[in-house]
Image (cartoon, rainbow, N blue to C red):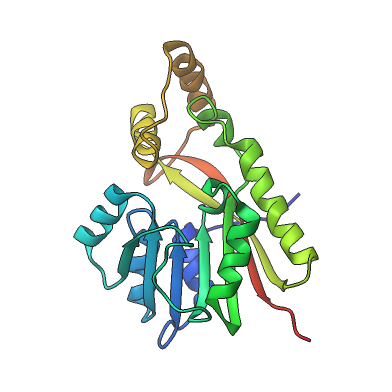
Amino acid sequence: MIDRETIDNVQAVCREIGNGAGKTILDIGCGTGALCRALAGIGASVTGIDPSQNAINQANELGGGATYQIATLDELEASPNSFDVVIFCTSLHHIPNMAEALHGALKRIKPDGKIIVLEPQTDDPLYPVYRWLDDEKEVQIRAQACVDTFIADGPMERSKTLYFNKKYRYASLDHLIDDMMEVDDSRSLSNEARGKMAAAYKAAVQTDADGNYIDHWYRLDVLETTKG
């Protein structure tokens, strides 16, 4: 049984960064920039990239001190070995060639740089709910296996692994569905699947003083260059 701390994923990453002053950070698949804004808030110089123009437009509108590009890692306008930290925050499993992405990230970090990979775990209480809208179990398992293979191949070593729980806050099932649709508007939900999702939601949802939530489990890996 894994002992999981309850913490927000943005907070978990920021805690690993520590004092951001003077650090250059790349957030791959930054979405609307929540993590970028938090990292800029602790003093880091942050670049966020995402292939979605809509997501980057929203990130720019929200401001917060980071710089954004509509780009994939291959398209990024930045010099090699220019970042102290490269982050995949729940984004690695969305990249078609995950191994190539990790090696691409390695080329972007400084010689003493780090890569942080945060991925959901599919044996958690939220998976039986969201799988009816988008079953990402197989690709998320492959993402974590890809990290393990990348480490086994030798260019980097795992300096830390953190297993934690985030309380995902949803006022209702409709709120959860809207949130998932906003991330990927290609998702769809049949009436039959919606009924099954509603039953799973009812079984999984909990309530505390701040409202409804469902536990969502993550694994965070910190990778550092293998010391010769």
Q: Name the residue: 34% across, 28% down.
A: 174
Residue 192 versus residue 163 in the image, above or below: above
Q: Residue furthest left?
A: 61
Residue 116 versus residue 182 in the image, above or below: below
Residue 99 versus residue 84 in the image, above or below: above
Residue 49 versus residue 86 in the image, above or below: above
Please identify the quarter of the rendering in which residue 76 is found.
bottom left
Q: Name the residue: 58% across, 80% down.
A: 113
**Side of 51 relative to 139 (left or right):** left
**Side of 140 relative to 154 (left or right):** left
Q: Quadrant of the C terminus?
A: bottom right
Give the image location of residue 178, x and y in percent. Answer: 33, 33
Q: Nearer the viewer, residue 177 or 57?
A: 57
Q: Nearer the viewer, residue 54 or 71?
A: 71
Give the image location of residue 42, x and y in percent. Answer: 37, 78
Q: Nearer the viewer, residue 29 or 76?
A: 76
Residue 111, visible in the rendered structure: yes
Q: Residue furthest top?
A: 192
Residue 122, visible in the rendered structure: no
